[in-house]
Image: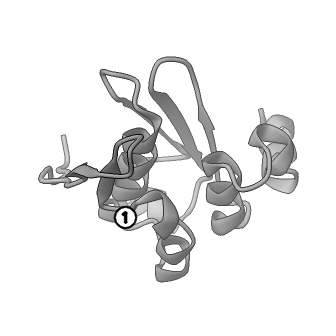
Amino acid sequence: MARIFNAMTQYPEMVAGDDRFCTVLMKAFQGRLIGKVGADGVYAVGLRKSEQTRQLGATGALGISVKIEDGNLDVLYAAVAEILEQLGVATPEVSSALIGFRQGKIVNTAGVVTGGLAFPFRLRAA
């Protein structure tokens, strides 16, 4: 598992390609996190064991999974970024790197703003 984690963090562009969320996310975290989108609006995150994971109550590494019911990837990426920020693991530099994936406007194919993103949820300890 460590070998896969290290390969993904050293070569994130091989996981998803240039300018894709997975790549930008892993580059922003500089080896502390891996992330990969799956089918139908599922995203998986693995955080390396650190003081941050200990503060979150984990005794080792931490895994996070996110599912967006309708499979919308734009919403999925924005939600993952929001979750990492709420957990306190995203530094201001990381949040800045992910800002392009957290745009608040939803635009239709005609270029008309039809909605926006908002995250009224607040994470809490289980």
In screen coordinates, is 104 left or right of 49?
left
- Residue drawn at x 42%, y 56% is 81
Kindly state the secondary structure of the residue where label 1 is placed: helix
- Please identify the quarter of the rendering in which residue 74 is found: top left
In screen coordinates, is 83 left or right of 49?
left
Mark 1 surroundings within 10 Å by alpha-carbon count, few (fewer than 14), some (14 through 19), many (20 or more): some
Q: Which residue is mark 1?
A: 85
- Residue 80 location in percent, x, y? 42, 48
Q: Is residue 45 above or below residue 94?
A: above
In screen coordinates, is 119 left or right of 44?
left
Q: In the picture, which quadrant includes the N terminus?
A: top right
- Residue drawn at x 40%, y 31% is 72
Picture colour scheme = one colour
Q: Amino acid at mark 1?
A: Glu
Instruction: Point out the residue furthest to the bottom here.
Output: 92
Instruction: Point out the residue furthest to the front here.
Output: 110
Residue nearest the viewer, comparing 125 with 104 = 104
- Residue drawn at x 37%, y 64% is 85
- Residue 31 location in percent, x, y? 73, 60
- Residue drawn at x 30%, y 58% is 105
Residue nearest the viewer, comparing 115 with 86 = 115
- Please identify the quarter of the rendering in which residue 66 is found: top left
Residue nearest the viewer, comparing 16 with 94 = 16
- Residue 82 location in percent, x, y? 34, 57
